[in-house]
Each structure stands twice: as structure tokens, then as C-alpha cells.
Image (spheres, rainbow, N blue to C red):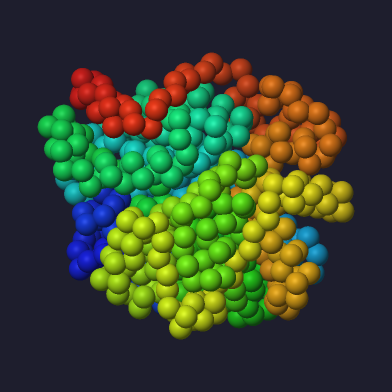
């Protein structure tokens, strides 16, 4: 299986795509020939999560042997990296609704499910490509990717990682997770700007000839841990496959029966993985894109117009505070009928005007697979309160957005009769101020004081990754203007070169 660019005929090996992240023309890598309808329940029944990952990845990373993939997967998914032996347990809310819990990894967010494996894929790809330069992972984060990437890559030989996050755009706990990160090869910096500023800058770095030549002279190669990298994206397909198997095994649906999925998403990688699972044969009915007030994606599924020319909001679900969704380009590639020229045209329109639109006919086609909806912060808090008081189940704000969209669709008569799964993206304790407000508890300056109060009310124990964090020292407290990001990267390149 080779990978091609969404914008041209450029085609590369899996190891090259893993190593470089972004295509040379600025596009994203997708499979040269997508493996459609290759999965069914009979071949998946009885398999562990690790075995399901192996089946999924065998269709994409054919450059590795079965044994190599098996070893990498075993290293990524075990009792040291995930607190639940099922990896992705399914929680049943009622006969019509389940929650797929994606937050049992080291950093308590769904990003762990890919970023526990990605460092092994990247290291193996580096060996295959005979690449002897130091790898510098450059990552922008709206909250969860940064910590998961830092944890995955800390102290990995021959690899360094630098993470940028918006100084006022993450939760207090997410900020502590990054500021207190351990490892001798990591660097973290806040920026005075938003996630889109950080992500757009990094995309320009990957295609900036002068910056890349400077890094090359210093023995450094840039790569990415964002979901623009195929090594981040395709492992995410596995948890949709695993969720389907669990639904059948627990009697929620029958073998082959369709189910809907509600996904809180900002950068579109999470829901795109669900779309890919459907293309591979998993009987997903509709993928429902749940947004907060930054509702550029849900608006697109309503109108067919992607319009970034709108106010940017800092919300209580910060990981979705995004207006430029990177993985949306991959989706457009398939909407266009795999027309790279059309995708290049759309992306140029987005870059120059901040707006692009699909035809009415294309909108009708994509609505067979997708729908959208959004709720605001007040509604998010109300959903957290409602679900906790009625079911005794505590949602994080992103999952609450998905739950709220699900409720609204049913109130409006837009829901289907199919069983629905909400993909729960993070542990609620990562967002103590929002949870306190939702449960009518006092907020405090110290997030751990808030978690103590939440725990006293709910009886939910403080997860060990957060308990361990409490007494660690802050290592990275600096914040820089977004205009200084380039110099920050070059300075880190210099420090890597000096250590080599």
C-alpha cells in the first residue's frame, strides 16, 4: 500500500509518509487505493483490542511484517499504558444509547489511542528509510494532542518534540499536564494566539524550503504528531471497529446491523477515522459531527459551505476551538471523487478567501453519511448536570457537546431508530472548572482543589496520572507572540544539533 497526496499525483511509501507527515505539495497523504469493505464481524469476533488494531493496520502499513506490527502494538497497548484491560470499554446508557470510552490511556484523552502507537511506527519508518537525522516532531495542540504526543515521545532516542498551545485556550489541567512534562527531548511553549494560528504556522514550516534547509544542515528532519500524519490517523480507525464488535457482543445490535455515531470533533480527525471504518465495512449508519460555538463544521453539513470568516470563540470545550480543520482536506478528497485537482482548488480558495463550497449534488451525497449539530457553553453545562443527575455518569465537556447534539436531534425529530454511540473523548477530571460550574460547586484557582470537591460529591477517584501530576514542578512556563514561533523552532533545532 502506497500513499498519495490529496493535491497531486505525488505517491510515496508508507514509511516515507509516516516520517514526513505532510506531502511535499502541502497536501495530506491518503491510501493510493482505499481498502473498502474488507472488515466484517465474523473475522473480528473474539479478538482483543490489540488484535483488532493489527487487522486494521495490516491494510495500511504493509511495509511492516505481521510480526513487526504485532510487537509495536503490544508495546503500545498494555497495562502500563492503559488503565482498562479492554482499552476501549463500552458503557451502556439505555437500550438506544451507548458511550464508547476512549480516555483510559496515560493522559486521559482519546489521543492516547493513536499516540501510544505512533512513536513505534515512526521509529520503525525511520529505520526503513535509513534516516540518520534527528527527528523533530512539531505539534500544535488545542489541549489533548500536546500532552499525549509529549508522553508518547518523551526520551525516544533520535527523536525530539516541540509543542505549541494557545496560552488562554486550554483547560487549567491540560496546561499543567504540558507545563510539567518530563523528558530530556521535549519542549513546550504557549503562544499568544489560538490553535489555528499554531497549526497554520506549522504547516508553513513543513513546506518552507529555507527553514527545512537550515534544519537539514543541523542534522534535523521535521515531522508531525498531529492527525495530518497517517501514523496518527489510521490507528484511530481501530476504536470504531472495536466499538462495533462490543455492540454486537453485548447485544446492543445484531451482527451487520447499522448504528449511528456522534463525534465531538474540531480538527476532523476523530470523525474521519469513523468514516474510514465505515468504508472498510463497519456498518455505521450516520456520522454526526458535534460542534461547540465554533461551528464551522456543523454549518458545512447544513449548507455545503465551509466559511472560516467568522468570530473565533474560546469555549468550555477547548479541544474543539478550531476553525481550520486539517483533516477536512482528506474528506474533501473523497467528496470530490478522489479528484486531487479539485481539492487543490478548494484549498487555494480557503487560503485566499477563507471560504469554499461543494455543489448541491455533492452535499446531498455526503449527507447520506454525515450530519452536524452544535450547542453552546450553557447547554454543555446543562447536559453535564442532566446526565449526572439522571444516570450518575459524569461527562467531560466535549462528550457533553456530543450528547447535547444527540438530544437536540431527537427533540427535533431528526434522530434515527438506530442504536447510537457517543464517542467520549476525555476524562471529565481534565476540565475541573466546567464540571464544578455544571454541578453547582465552587470554582477555585487551584484545579486540584476543585477535583477534591468534585470527588467528594461524585465518589470518582482522582486518576493516577493526575494524582502524580500534582506535586511535579513546572518546567515550561514561557509564552511567546505567535510571530516568534519560527525563531523558537530554529532555536530548538540549534539545541538539538548541539546535543548530537
**Callout count:** 0
**Left/right of residue 403 with respect to residue 94 in the rendered view:** left
Taking depth in this image into account, of 500 and 386 the one nearest to the observer is 386
Taking depth in this image into account, of 88 and 298 the one nearest to the observer is 298
**Left/right of residue 47 with respect to residue 69 in the rendered view:** right
Which quadrant of the figure contains the C terminus? top left
Tell me if I can see residue 67 in this picture: no
Residue at position x 71%, y 38% in the image? 434
Q: Vertically, is 176 above or below 337?
A: above
Q: Position of residue 333 (x, y in %)?
A: 36, 69
Tell me if I can see residue 470 in this picture: yes
Residue at position x 33%, y 55% in the image? 351
**Left/right of residue 64 with respect to residue 220 in the rendered view:** right
Residue at position x 82%, y 39% in the image? 439
Taking depth in this image into account, of 401 and 315 the one nearest to the observer is 315
Which quadrant of the figure contains the N terminus? bottom left
Q: Vertically, is 240 above or below 151?
A: below
Q: Position of residue 345 (x, y in %)?
A: 29, 67
In which image quadrant can residue 481 be found? top left
In which image quadrant can residue 161 be found? top left
Q: Position of residue 138 (x, y in %)?
A: 34, 38
Q: Position of residue 393 (x, y in %)?
A: 79, 49
**Left/right of residue 478 with respect to residue 390 in the rendered view:** left
Residue at position x 51%, y 66% in the image? 300
Taking depth in this image into account, of 222 and 88 the one nearest to the observer is 222
Amino acid at each position: 500500500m502506497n500513499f498519495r497526496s490529496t493535491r497531486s499525483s505525488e505517491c510515496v511509501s508508507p514509511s516515507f509518509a509516516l516520517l514526513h507527515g505532510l506531502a511535499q505539495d502541502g497536501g495530506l497523504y491518503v491510501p493510493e487505493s482505499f481498502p473498502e469493505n474488507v472488515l466484517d464481524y465474523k473475522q473480528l469476533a473474539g479478538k482483543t483490542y490489540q488484535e483488532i488494531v493489527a487487522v486494521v493496520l495490516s491494510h495500511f502499513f504493509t511495509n511492516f511484517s505481521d510480526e513487526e506490527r504485532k510487537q509495536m502494538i503490544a508495546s503500545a497497548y498494555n497495562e502500563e499504558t492503559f488503565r482498562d484491560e479492554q482499552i476501549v470499554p463500552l458503557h451502556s446508557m439505555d437500550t438506544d444509547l451507548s458511550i464508547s470510552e476512549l480516555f483510559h490511556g496515560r493522559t486521559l484523552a482519546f489521543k492516547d489511542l493513536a499516540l501510544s502507537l505512533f512513536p513505534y511506527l515512526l521509529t520503525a519508518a525511520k529505520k526503513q528509510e535509513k534516516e540518520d537525522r534527528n527527528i523533530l516532531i512539531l505539534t500544535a495542540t488545542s489541549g489533548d494532542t500536546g500532552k499525549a504526543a509529549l508522553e508518547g515521545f518523551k526520551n525516544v532516542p533520535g527523536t525530539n518534540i516541540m509543542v505549541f498551545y494557545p496560552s488562554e485556550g486550554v483547560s487549567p489541567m491540560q496546561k499543567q499536564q504540558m507545563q510539567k512534562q518530563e523528558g530530556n527531548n521535549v519542549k513546550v511553549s504557549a503562544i499568544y494566539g489560538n490553535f489555528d494560528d499554531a497549526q497554520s504556522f506549522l504547516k508553513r514550516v513543513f513546506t518552507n524550503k529555507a527553514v527545512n534547509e537550515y534544519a537539514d544542515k543541523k542534522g534535523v528532519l521535521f515531522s508531525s504528531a498531529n492527525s495530518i500524519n497517517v501514523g496518527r490517523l489510521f490507528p484511530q480507525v481501530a476504536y470504531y471497529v472495536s466499538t462495533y464488535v462490543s455492540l454486537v457482543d453485548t447485544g446492543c445490535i445484531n451482527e451487520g446491523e447499522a448504528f449511528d455515531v456522534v463525534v465531538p470533533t474540531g480538527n476532523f480527525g476523530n470523525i474521519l477515522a469513523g468514516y474510514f471504518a465505515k468504508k472498510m465495512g463497519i456498518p455505521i449508519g450516520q456520522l454526526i459531527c458535534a460542534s461547540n460555538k465554533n461551528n464551522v463544521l456543523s454549518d458545512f453539513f447544513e449548507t455545503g459551505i465551509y466559511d472560516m470568516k467568522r468570530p473565533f470563540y474560546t469555549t468550555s470545550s477547548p479541544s474543539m476551538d478550531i476553525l481550520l480543520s486539517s483533516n477536512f482536506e482528506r474528506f474533501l478528497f473523497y467528496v470530490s471523487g478522489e479528484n486531487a485537482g479539485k481539492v487543490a482548488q478548494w484549498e487555494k480558495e480557503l487560503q485566499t478567501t477563507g471560504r469554499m463550497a461543494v455543489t448541491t449534488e455533492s452535499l446531498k451525497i455526503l449527507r447520506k453519511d454525515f450530519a452536524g449539530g452544535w450547542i453552546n457553553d450553557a447547554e454543555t453545562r446543562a447536559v453535564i448536570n442532566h446526565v449526572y443527575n439522571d444516570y450518575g455518569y459524569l461527562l467531560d465537556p466535549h462528550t457533553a457537546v456530543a450528547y447535547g447534539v444527540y438530544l437536540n436531534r431527537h427533540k427535533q425529530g431528526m434522530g434515527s431508530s438506530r442504536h447510537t454511540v457517543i464517542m467520549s473523548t476525555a476524562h471529565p477530571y481534565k476540565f475541573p472548572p466546567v464540571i464544578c460550574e455544571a454541578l453547582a460547586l465552587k470554582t477555585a484557582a487551584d484545579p486540584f482543589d476543585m477535583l477534591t470537591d468534585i470527588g467528594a460529591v461524585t465518589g470518582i477517584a482522582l486518576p493516577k496520572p493526575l494524582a502524580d501530576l500534582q506535586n511535579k514542578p513546572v518546567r515550561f512556563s514561557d509564552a511567546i507572540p505567535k510571530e516568534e514561533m519560527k525563531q523558537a523552532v530554529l532555536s530548538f533545532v540549534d539545541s538539538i544539533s548541539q546535543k548530537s
